[in-house]
Image: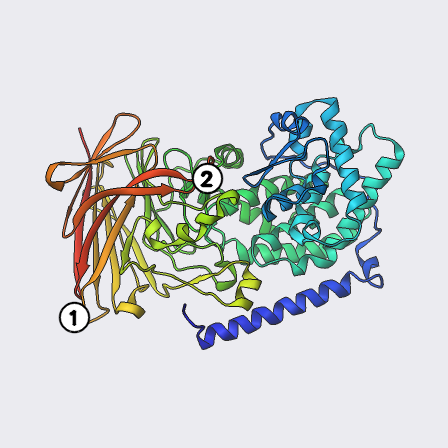
Amino acid sequence: MPSLTIAEQTRLARLATDRVRRAAVARLLGSRLLRWRYGAPVADELLIVPQELRTADPSFADELAVGHLGFGGAVAYIGGGSPFELKPPSREWERELHGFGWLRHLRASDNEDACAQAVDLVSEWIRRHASRSGIGWEPPVIGRRLISWISNAPLLLEGVDQATYDRIADSLGDQLIRLSATWRDAAAGYPRLLSLTALVLADLCVAGHDRHLREIASAFAEELESQVLPDGGHISRNPGIPVELLLDFLPLRQCFAVRDRASPPALGAAIERMLPQLRFMRLGDGSLARFNGMGSPNLDLLATVLAYGEVPASLAEFAPASGYARLHRGDTVIIADVGPPPPLELAGQAHAGCLSFEMSAGRCPVFVNCGAPGAADQDWRAASRATASHNTLCLGGKSSSKLVQHELLESLVGAPPIRFPEHVVASVKDQPDGGVSLRASHDGYHRPFGLIHHRQLTLDAGGCKLSGTDSLGPQRGKLRLAVDVPFAVHFHLHPDAGCSLAPRAAHAEIALPTGEGWTFTAQGAQIAVEDSVHCADLSGPRRALQIVLRGACYGESEVKWVLERRT
């Protein structure tokens, strides 16, 4: 595994120092001497109840009634007992349990027994977890719980006796004070922004906490500016995170309006940037492209947030800050990863998929990356991050990015981050004949092999022909390797697409579920159809196929390939 450079060691030292400082500040501000700064530790009156935009599933109540509780891709059987007594099947399951996002399902069931059970479970949590320790008191978990309890306040507070009302209100106030002191200790990226979002929302909704709003709204706006990039992508480069952010930001903006308060300009600006970026990252079937931690798509949630933005007359072809390119002609859409990994502290979920692409024809995905597995299938996690799991060139069986296995860094990030490529260059140009072309290169293979990977993709005006060139060569001059290095260019097919090799391996025939067919031909490498695994599926990893172009590089190599719709 690669050792840290001096610059990375310096960055790691700063990250560690910052984590220690944030934890110390959180402990100090959470002390009894300073807790008064955040207002009264009660929430006995809610001024407004924010809208819940996340889709509700009324059948959740029926499953709970028979003792089944499914979170994070895992199902636990609780029988007639309490979910808080179980040994959690996974940490993700435990976080979702303590986050109480599932309250919306019980509220949607419109079942008196389910509603009563919701109140009972909240009361039980308060009784069991007053010690303020464990996963349930991690800042982002507190944040999700505050948002859920406040958004579902009618379920929890209407029609209950005074003792239950006071117990829930007191706990809400205590959690708000706790998060006000500890949000700084949340992990960098989405967890910290979620924590701040919950605080701003709670300060708007809970009576008596207005005096803290200006301070926390300022911190929220600062975090927004650092995490939401100028083109609307998230700094982690995960296309799915803007969806989660918008599901909380849109109700938050409405709360500012209802309270007749001016929302931070950064909030409205971030929303306006993220909505078109989500459309930019969508394939023809409506799903987001599977890059850098993006797993199985939730089309309902995506459709919900996109309903709040106007459909633009046209979409950009290049998002340089996020590092993605989009080629769209006819009914064919191609989205390519043309960016380096995010900063080390945010690269724990990033993938080694530089210059990979996804493609859809009409509403059918054709080529898709393997994607990130669900929480219940983390055994596939490492493989899904590798370059070979993406639609790009893999040299010498190695990934273009390297895992950084460093105990301190992993403790800060939560997983081994990746680094490399350091330099990625890309440009998108319209062609005179109406087509569009992407040219890109990365230096992920320069250190081990002295080679640069160049890729060109050209989509014709009708969206019926995609021409590609993948080449390897030195940065300058000529290079002759001591031994030939094998390479493979992978094209992973969506599980619903079929593929077969023509006689004498002259070309591959792709069949889509609609009956449409595409022909794949190549020069400069041997073509084969091999097995693949699609990790980003709601049902878990699925068997799929891939077209693979194999050859050997002696110092310079070039492979040309064409994908053409059959008429």
Q: Residue furthest bottom?
A: 6
Residue 190 visible, this orientation? yes
42 and 370: which one is in front? 370
Question: Which image quadrant for residue 26?
Answer: bottom right
Kindly identify which residue carries mark 2.
296
Kindly identify which residue carries mark 1.
480
Residue 47 visible, this orientation? no
Q: Residue furthest left?
A: 504
- Crowdedness near tag 2: few (<14), some (14–19) or many (≥20) residues, C-alpha within 10 Å: many
**Label 2 amino acid?**
Ser
Q: Position of residue 274 (x, y in %)?
A: 50, 46
Is residue 11 positioned above or below 309 on the image?
below
Is residue 482 positioned above or below 454 on the image?
below
214 and 544: which one is in front? 544
Is residue 426 positioned above or below 116 on the image?
below
430 and 191: which one is in front? 191
Question: Which image quadrant for residue 156?
Answer: top right
